[in-house]
Amino acid sequence: MRILLVASAFNSLTQRVHAELTDCGHELDVAVGGDDEALRAAVRRHTPGLVVAPMLRTAIPRDVWSAHTCLVVHPGPPGDRGPSSLDWAVATGAQEWAVTVLEAEAEMDAGDVWASVPFRIPGAGDAAPAGGGTGEGAGPGKSDIYRNEAADAATAAVRLAVERYESGNWKPRSQHDGETDVTVRPYFGQARRRIDWAADSCATVLRKLRAADSQPGVLDELLGAEWFLHGGHPEDGLRGAPGEIVATRTGAICRATRDGAVWIPQLRPRRTPGGPRTFKQPAVRALGERLPAVPEVPAPLVLPAGRRTWTDIRYEEKGTADGRTGFLWFSFPGGAMSTDHCRRLLAAYRHALSRPTSVLVFGSARDFFSNGIHLGVIEAAADPAQESWENIQAMDDLVEALLRTTDRLVIAALGGNAAAGGVMLALAADEVWCRQGAVLNPHYRLMGLYGSEYWTYTLPRRVGETAAARLMREAAPVSAGAAAAMGLVDRLVPAAPQDFAGVTSRMATQAALDRELGGRLAEKAAALRRDETRKPLQEYRREELRVMRGQFFGPDEPYHALRRAFVRKEPTTGVRPAT
């Protein structure tokens, strides 16, 4: 069926719906952003059999939904109405929620129900997965839940709704039948999110931060300025006056509450009237000279059992003398990896290589694996071109370390989405294990970049030259299932987001007991020697970076405008990626 996908932004859910409907054989056109007239023009141009809206901030015009069936994804159960559904669910501690596919009509969120799929919201009472950077007891933030549990439910609901519509014999259920409990929830504004540092408990502060991550953040006053706080993780050891910054750690700040403390990784300055749009930065970098003299507390690489603290990189081991497995879990906000992130992760990787293991799992326990270089840190740098150059070099160093590991099996574990250099980082491992709901974007073109991370070596050897060129050219999202079919992914892990780390751990521990592992490692080392004889790895890197250097330092390259628009969420009118 010909489907027009309509969205305010090509966000993670829109990408996943696009990828999975494509897998189902539907022909998709996409209309992203724009006003009502742009939507009308898209409908006239594409003449769709069905319109699907995974994420809309505004209503579909009456003349469009009255002439075409328009299915809208609402992140709430039937009867739930309002623009902040998931915010309310997280803020109020709901444990069960749902995603509903509605038919557009005059009243927002009140249309007939084509499908509704429930999901469970992991909260503060859930044990934290291995790694993931949160310690115990915090629970994932709203954006994490949106990309994972909610996205699983939304995709299932969209596929079911499309199947029912295509069948021609399904009658959607009215919400005006008197049997649906209607709850109208207002917009969840900053007045409801405000933290009272003197009165709010640590649990309350964390709940408010979770419900605002990563958008819109919690507006707060700090050190004489107004900031949006992004992210929140518990700390069980540090204390201070409520609201006071008591420590820093790898770019994050720790603020005391009345009964504990919380780690806040990112801040965004409040936009001044008429000023440029602001964007999230590591908290320490954002505060700059405002930051008082507080101790930098080292991040524990190995987290003792029962600790409630935050670290973005963790290492642990499991198994017996017959086969030990190492797990290097990492989790960076938004999946972006700055120069510092890459260097610290490389140091942790080298530590993992010093351990007596035969299998090493390298990845994300849930949510993002990696989205490549940190465009926000680059945009904020005094010299964005130089910071871009240093960042890509640090990414390349990390990728090379994986490629040159021949004494153990390296498994890239993708608990969530990956894009650009993050996909290529995963491909440097021997095997890629991916949660079934993840989405991969194995390309750079939309940011005006050629790419590095040894992709000219790893991508063609995985999928072939023709498919590699197509992936780079089309720059389309790829579902985990499609990635497995083409060879980008070796094993799909059919686990819920909260269960991915545990399932992966059991699978990897079993792999360490494989009697054929020794022979496989010997062949792996021999294959690398053969490949380097044909063309050294450094030659791939040199060729890639020659192109990237021109794109970073060329003042007229589209990368600079595209990066700025992406980071600041500005339109890209008149700016097109290089072909």
Image: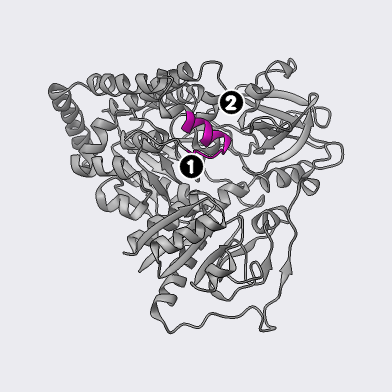
Across and down, in percent, residue 457 comes to 24, 31
Magenta stretch holds residue 392 = no
The residue tagged with tag 2: helix, strand or loop?
A: loop
Residue extending farthest to the right is 199
Q: Can residue 494 be seen here?
A: no
Mark 2 surroundings within 10 Å by alpha-carbon count, few (fewer than 14), some (14 through 19), many (20 or more): some
Residue 411, quarter of the rendered image: top left
Across and down, in percent, residue 272 comes to 73, 31
Residue situated in front as seen by the camera: 130 or 220: 220
Mark 2 sits on what residue? Answer: 299
Query: In the rendered structure, which amino acid carries the disc numbered 2?
Result: Ala
Across and down, in percent, residue 576 comes to 41, 36
Residue 235, quarter of the rendered image: top right
Mark 1 sits on what residue? Answer: 368
Mark 1 surroundings within 10 Å by alpha-carbon count, few (fewer than 14), some (14 through 19), many (20 or more): many
Magenta stretch holds residue 568 = yes
Q: Residue at x 36, y 19 (%)?
A: 549
Query: In the rendered structure, which amino acid carries the disc numbered 1?
Result: Phe
Residue situated in front as seen by the camera: 148 or 10: 10
Looking at the magenta stretch, what is its main secondary structure? Answer: helix
Q: Is residue 457 left or right of residue 394?
A: left
